[in-house]
């Protein structure tokens, strides 16, 4: 009894305040309250079980019968729904609470409505008057007319209890209840609403989902054990009730005793009877402990499956960090889990262990199949790798290969406890590039790779040959320790993956594919090859669940649904969205089809994102015909509402890549009569336009090499180009059947295509030059000559010439005869462009993998070392190593009356000041993170955001003081920053800034440095800035009137001395020193771009070089890059 007040205070505080939070924060805040209760001098039970204290076993069993999920979070929420003072506002993204409330309060005539329902006020008044319960959905559209109800603003008149709704007084029944609910967990409610309601949060956590999955699999696989468990709960409730009755009987007997207790025989007999019954209850309770042990043992066998399912859902929820298209609901995963529990293979198997293996395998296969078909092709391998990590972690006896993944994700440096993270690279490895050597040096930290350098030397000939293979991932040299051949196939595949990552990064995706196939089976990655829409419609989606067909710009997937409706003899109503009439037609068609069971196809829904959000709410509330299906087609567009993506079954269609496939699509879209229209030369021009369109689009695949930016060229550009062509040719031909090629409007076509149609989207001057070069080659009178070359060296040394055809079927036949395997040289690019593209995709996959963290972000408040999750220990180690790596401080430059006049000094003073302040802020942030990880300091919003960014490998927003590539990881960023700061320290101590050799890419404002040198030369010689031209020279000379920069490399070419370049097959060639000077003479040569980074988004300055063929250099994307480390 002495703990009654304290227990009641804690429990009431929990009911009043904890409902808004998820399970983890509820436990955290509940234990924080312990300190306040202790300080108040109140006694309470430290082991207070909230659920058992606030509810009975009978209550909990009844809730579970009414579809309440069996886990602590939902049970606590049910308690709040039965013990509230202020009406509940429920956050329910998964929809589990709606089902439970409708069943639990069915006896109170509960009615479901919505704030968006036109009859909402009528339903409210009816429920108030007759005492019904009301469930109101879509609280994000809250109507203030409900304020008097939430405030309980009642008035009494003549024995009646009235409440004012709008302008009416309504009789209020004492049995009235209202529950408000929303499925949008991101909505932010105003303080006005928050003060009037009790929040109840049903958002699923990993632990609660694992509990639900465990209960479901036990019901399906071991109904005997599930029955025993439910019986135990009932027995425990009965025992508790019986003991209470015995206690009451004892008190009653003592109260009725007369005289001395020991002399009252009736009391003694009652006590003996109570003692015997209590002993019997205790004995039965002990027997239940044995059964409970058996239940726990069986549950433990399925716990790994439940945990894997929970981790899969946690991973799926984070995929939107990678792409806006990836949103998944809890119902989606629950439906998959229910499906795999009914796998047909289980019918012939009775052994529980084998059945568990079949279910586990089917779970991962089904998740990959259903999720991957709604993903872009480049992200499917990433999904498979994420599922593979969950799969291998679910087996505690198998290795998790964390060292391998830490190395791939760039985390090995700070995960390693070794203070000296640098590994000395031995000599004798000349067959490897410097980048290869650095990458291999990092593998030394992985178990089995301790002797990697020795093995490379001993097997140098085989490794050299292997480096040139087209498919090196199929036969990776064994440069790890495996003398006894005891490594598992998966371990060998993982070792091969990190070797490929180090030496042939362009084959990383292919190697990852092999790893996944080894971990699961060879068919795992083949599941997404064929998308069977009919199977999705008939076997997977419910009538209220739309099928969303997303495709790249210009690709129309609606034809697939129209063909399917014909094949299956289903009635289909197709409507194009985008106009006011389309919305009205869609609403009418949906209303009719949900009753009749027709199919409805809504096209181009990405044009109406706000209408889509309302459509999702409408679908959720309606009860359609079982045969009704809704299909939506949309372009992959960031404005697609996440709610419709979450509610739909998404299928992504990507058009085939390649010049041939693009030409076929373009020619197929042009009507034959348009091609044959006079003059006859028109058809050749159409072919040239289609070739241009294919060339322009295919070069986008090789961004930033093909184009510096991924411009949004689409089929709309092709249509406008064709219309422009027709207008220009008609103006010249004036109805004549033939026109001489020289008289065709070549200049008009080139100008409009260059400046308006395609060039209008280009914002880079060198991309514009490239487009002009392509147009000059295509749109010329020579294109009608037989020897006009479209592709030089198309097959061997033979070229591909412009065909002499005028009919559409002839042109399509010519295109179909082109080779399927496309070389980058067809587009004017170097053949190693494919290698660059694949390397970039592999790097992007690893960056995205780092974004999808594998542990929930949480901080422990109690300071216990063992409470730290693994990521926190890693983050603490990371902060420690970065604090050791970065300099302590940067001394600012001394300003004098003389040096302040020097433009170079002013530039570097700004650089040093910026670097000094940035360093202070970063060291402060890292010290705070270290303190939080050591539990010496509580976290706040800033440290939470900082830790979240660092855990995902992203550069925190507060550190971004200068331009860096968008995809850069924080590990690479800090390493690069350290080099920048070293340069600033060196500059700060320099007595002659002009003679210093600077790393241009390591400055915060490289364009400002170029400007400062120009100002200095103009100031020293009293020249006008406009008269000065930049002259470049690669290599160091004895000249004293030059500025020297380092760290520059040339992409796609190499220096042959001075300002001359020649093409080469190397991806990049380094320049030791580049000298430049400002002169009044014009710089001779062709201008090439100097970019800040390899992503080519930031142009520093054009540079003039002597080139053999300017057109070829532009087509091959030759450029200079100032910083190759990011």
Image (tube, grey):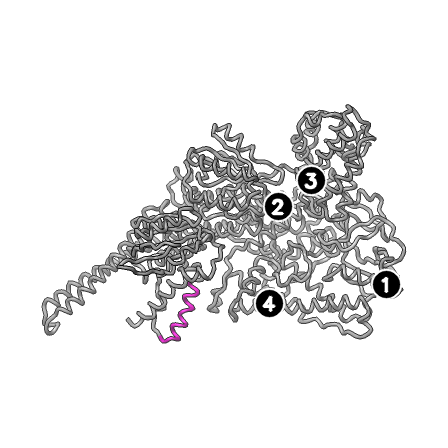
Magenta residues, as a range?
Answer: 26-41
Q: Main secondary structure of the magenta part?
A: helix
Mark 1 highlights which residue? 1017
Q: Is residue 1022 left or right of residue 474?
A: right
Q: Is residue 805 above or below residue 59?
A: above
Q: Is residue 554 rendered magenta in the image?
A: no
Q: Is residue 26 left or right of residue 235?
A: right
Mark 3 highlights which residue? 698
Cα–Cα span, label 3 and label 2: 21 Å
Q: Is residue 549 above or below residue 262?
A: above
Asked if marks 3 and 4 touch (Cβ < 8 Å), the reply is no
Question: Are there few (<14), some (14-19), or many (20+) residues within 10 Å of tag 1?
Answer: many
Question: Are there few (<14), some (14-19), or many (20+) residues within 10 Å of tag 3?
Answer: some
Mark 2 highlights which residue? 509
Cα–Cα span, label 1 and label 2: 50 Å
Mark 4 highlights which residue? 925
Q: Nearer the viewer, residue 713 or 1109?
A: 713
Q: Nearer the viewer, residue 378 or 573?
A: 573
N-term-proximal mark, 4 vs 2: 2
């Amino acid at each position: 009894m002495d703990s009654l007040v304290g227990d009641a205070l804690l429990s009431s505080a929990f009911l009043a305040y904890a409902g808004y939070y998820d399970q983890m924060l509820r436990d955290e805040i509940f234990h924080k309250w312990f300190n306040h209760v202790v300080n108040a001098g109140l006694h309470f039970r430290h082991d207070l079980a909230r659920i058992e204290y606030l509810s009975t076993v009978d209550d909990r069993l009844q809730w579970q019968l009414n579809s309440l999920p069996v886990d602590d979070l939902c049970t606590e929420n049910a308690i709040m729904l039965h013990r509230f003072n202020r009406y509940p506002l429920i956050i329910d993204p998964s929809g589990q609470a709606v089902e439970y409330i409708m069943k639990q309060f069915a006896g109170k005539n509960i009615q479901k409505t919505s704030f968006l329902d036109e009859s909402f006020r009528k339903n409210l008044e009816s429920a108030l008057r007759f005492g019904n319960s009301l469930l109101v959905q879509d609280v994000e559209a809250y109507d203030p007319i409900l304020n008097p109800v939430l405030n309980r603003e009642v008035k009494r008149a003549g024995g009646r209890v009235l409440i004012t709704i709008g302008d009416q007084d309504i009789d209020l029944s004492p049995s009235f209840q209202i529950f408000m609910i929303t499925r949008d967990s991101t909505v932010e409610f105003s303080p006005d609403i928050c003060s009037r309601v009790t929040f109840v949060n049903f958002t699923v956590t990993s632990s609660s989902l694992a509990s639900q999955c465990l209960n479901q699999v036990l019901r399906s696989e071991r109904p005997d054990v599930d029955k025993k468990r439910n019986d135990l709960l009932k027995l425990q409730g009965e025992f508790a009730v019986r003991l209470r009755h015995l206690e009451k009987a004892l008190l009653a007997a003592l109260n009725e005793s007369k005289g001395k207790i020991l002399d009252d025989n009736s009391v003694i007999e009652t006590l003996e009877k109570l003692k015997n019954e209590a002993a019997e209850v205790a004995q039965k309770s002990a027997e239940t402990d044995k059964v409970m042990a058996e239940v726990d043992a069986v549950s433990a066998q399925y716990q790994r499956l439940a945990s894997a399912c929970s981790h899969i859902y946690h991973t799926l929820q984070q995929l939107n960090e990678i792409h806006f298209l990836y949103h998944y609901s809890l119902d989606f995963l629950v439906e998959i889990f229910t499906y795999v529990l009914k796998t047909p293979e289980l019918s012939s198997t009775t052994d529980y262990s084998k059945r568990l293996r079949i279910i586990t395998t089917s779970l991962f296969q089904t998740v990959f199949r259903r999720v991957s078909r709604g993903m872009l092709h480049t992200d499917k391998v990433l999904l498979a790798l994420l599922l593979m990590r969950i799969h291998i972690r679910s087996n505690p006896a198998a290795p998790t290969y964390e060292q391998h993944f830490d190395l791939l994700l760039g985390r090995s440096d700070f995960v390693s406890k070794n203070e000296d993270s640098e590994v000395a690279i031995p000599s004798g490895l000349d067959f490897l590039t410097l980048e290869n050597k650095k990458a291999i040096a990092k593998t030394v930290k992985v178990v089995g790779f301790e002797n990697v350098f020795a093995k490379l030397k001993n097997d140098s000939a085989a490794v050299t040959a292997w480096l040139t293979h087209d498919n090196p991932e199929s036969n990776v040299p064994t440069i790890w320790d495996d003398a006894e051949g005891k490594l598992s196939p998966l371990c060998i595949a993982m070792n091969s993956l990190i070797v490929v990552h180090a030496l042939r990064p362009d084959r990383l995706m292919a190697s990852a594919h092999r790893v996944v196939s080894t971990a699961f089976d060879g068919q795992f990655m083949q599941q997404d090859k064929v998308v069977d829409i009919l199977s999705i419609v008939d076997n997977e989606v419910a009538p209220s669940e739309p099928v969303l067909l997303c495709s790249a710009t210009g690709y129309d997937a609606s034809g697939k649904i129209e063909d399917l409706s014909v094949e299956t003899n289903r009635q289909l109503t197709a409507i194009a969205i985008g106009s006011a009439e389309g919305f009205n037609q869609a609403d009418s068609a949906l209303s009719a089809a949900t009753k009749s069971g027709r199919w409805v196809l809504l096209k181009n829904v990405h044009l109406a994102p706000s209408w889509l959000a309302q459509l999702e709410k409408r679908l959720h509330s309606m009860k359609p015909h079982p045969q009704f299906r809704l299909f939506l087609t949309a372009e992959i567009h960031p404005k697609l509402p996440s709610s419709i993506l979450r509610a739909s079954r998404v299928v992504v269609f990507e058009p085939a890549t390649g010049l041939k496939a693009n030409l076929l699509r373009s020619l197929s879209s042009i009507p034959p009569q348009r091609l044959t229209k006079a003059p006859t030369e028109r058809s050749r021009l159409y072919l040239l336009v289609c070739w241009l369109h294919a060339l322009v689009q295919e070069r986008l695949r090789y961004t930033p090499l093909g184009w510096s930016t991924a411009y949004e060229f689409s089929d709309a550009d092709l249509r406008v180009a064709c219309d422009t062509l027709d207008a220009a040719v008609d103006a010249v031909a004036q109805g004549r059947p033939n026109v001489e090629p020289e008289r065709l409007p070549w200049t008009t076509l080139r100008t409009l295509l260059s400046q308006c149609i395609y060039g209008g989207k280009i914002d880079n001057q060198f991309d514009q030059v490239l487009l002009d070069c392509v147009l000059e080659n295509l749109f010329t009178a020579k294109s009608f000559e037989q020897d006009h070359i479209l592709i030089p060296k198309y097959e061997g040394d033979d070229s591909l010439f412009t065909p002499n055809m005028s009919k559409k079927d002839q042109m399509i036949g010519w295109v179909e005869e082109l080779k399927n395997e496309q070389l980058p040289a067809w587009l004017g690019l170097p053949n190693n462009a494919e290698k660059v593209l694949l390397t970039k995709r592999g790097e992007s996959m690893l960056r995205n993998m780092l974004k999808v963290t594998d542990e929930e972000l949480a901080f422990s408040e109690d300071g216990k070392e063992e409470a730290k999750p693994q990521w926190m220990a890693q983050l603490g180690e990371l902060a420690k190593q970065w604090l050791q790596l970065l300099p302590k401080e940067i001394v600012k430059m001394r300003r004098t009356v003389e040096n302040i006049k020097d433009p170079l000094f002013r530039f570097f003073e700004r650089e040093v000041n910026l670097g000094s302040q940035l360093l202070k802020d970063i060291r402060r942030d890292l010290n705070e993170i270290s303190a939080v990880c050591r539990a010496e300091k509580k976290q706040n919003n800033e440290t939470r955001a900082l830790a979240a960014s660092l855990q995902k490998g992203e550069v925190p927003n507060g550190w971004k003081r200068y331009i860096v590539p968008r995809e850069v990881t924080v590990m690479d960023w800090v390493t690069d920053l350290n080099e920048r700061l070293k340069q600033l320290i060196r500059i700060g101590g320099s007595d002659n800034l002009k003679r210093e050799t600077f790393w241009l890419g390591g400055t915060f404002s490289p364009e400002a440095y170029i400007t400062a040198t120009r100002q200095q030369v103009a100031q020293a010689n009293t020249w006008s800035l406009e008269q000065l031209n930049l002259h470049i020279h690669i290599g160091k000379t004895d000249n004293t009137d030059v500025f020297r920069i380092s760290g520059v490399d040339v992409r796609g070419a190499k220096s042959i001395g001075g300002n001359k370049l020649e093409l080469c097959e190397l991806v990049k060639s380094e320049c030791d020193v580049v000298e430049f000077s400002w002169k009044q003479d014009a710089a001779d040569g062709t201008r090439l771009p100097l970019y800040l980074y390899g992503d080519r988004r930031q142009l520093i300055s054009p540079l003039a070089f002597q080139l053999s063929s300017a057109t070829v250099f532009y087509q091959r994307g030759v450029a200079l890059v100032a910083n190759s480390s990011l």
